[in-house]
Amino acid sequence: MALRKRAFGLAIGLFWGLIILLGTWFLLLRGSPGEVFSKASSFYIGYSYTWGGAVIGFIYGFVTGFIAGVFIAWLYEIFCKMLYKNKPAD
C-alpha cells in the first residue's frame, strides 16, 4: 500500500504547525516561555515568544512538517518495495 506523499506531508505539516502554534499560545497564557519553545527561535528565524511569533512558528512548522512528511512517505514506499518485492498483498 502506497502512501500519498502530499496528503501525508499535509497531515504532518498541519500537526507540527499546530503543535508550535498552540504550544506557544498556551505558554503565553501561562506566562513562561518554557525551555523548548525559547530555543525554537534558533531554528526558526523570526519566531519569537509572542502572539505574532506563534503564527510565524505555525508557518515554519507547517513547511518543515510537510517536507518531513513527504520524505517519510517516500522512505516508506522504498522500504515496502524492498521488503515486499515478490510477496502478494495481504
Image (cartoon, rainbow, N blue to C red):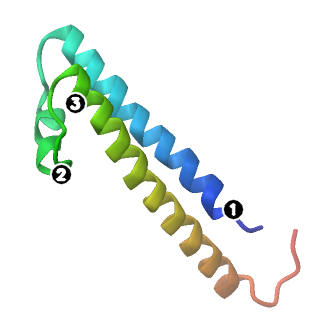
When asked about the image quadrant of residue 4, the answer is bottom right
Could you say where residue 30 lies in the image, as x and y percent from the top left?
Answer: 19, 9
Residue that carries the numbered disc 1 in the rendered image = 4
- Tell me, yes or no, whether the two marked residues, 1 and 3, touch with CB atoms within 8 Å: no
Residue type pointed to by label 2: Phe
Determine the residue positioned at 69% across, 83% down.
81
Q: Is residue 2 left or right of residue 31?
A: right
| Residue receiving disc 3 | 53
Q: CA distance from mark 1 to mark 2?
A: 28 Å
Which residue is pictured at 44% across the width and 61% down the height? 67
Labelled disc at residue 59: none
* Residue 77, image quadrant: bottom right
Q: What's under tag 3, amino acid-wise?
A: Gly
Q: Earlier in the sequence, mark 1 or mark 2?
A: 1
- Residue that extends furthest to the bottom in the rendered view of this protein: 86
* Quadrant of residue 26 within the rendered picture: top left
* Numbered-mark total: 3
Q: Within 10 Å of the Cα at label 3, are there few (<14), some (14-19), or many (20+) other Cα atoms?
A: some
Question: According to the image, label 2 marks what residue?
Answer: 43
Label 2 Cα crowd, 10 Å radius (few <14 / some 14-19 / many 20+)? few
Inter-mark Cα distance, 2 to 3 = 13 Å
Q: Nearer the viewer, mark 2 or mark 3?
A: 3
Question: In which quadrant will I find the C terminus?
Answer: bottom right
**Quadrant of the image for the N terminus?**
bottom right
Figure check: 29 above or below 60: above
For the residue marked with disc 1, what is the amino acid? Arg
Q: Residue 34 location in percent, x, y?
A: 13, 26
On screen, residue 54 versus residue 12, left or right, reads: left
Q: Earlier in the sequence, mark 2 or mark 3?
A: 2
Q: Which badge, 1 or 3, comes first in the chain's sequence?
A: 1
Pinpoint residue 83: horizontal percent, then vertical percent.
Answer: 67, 83
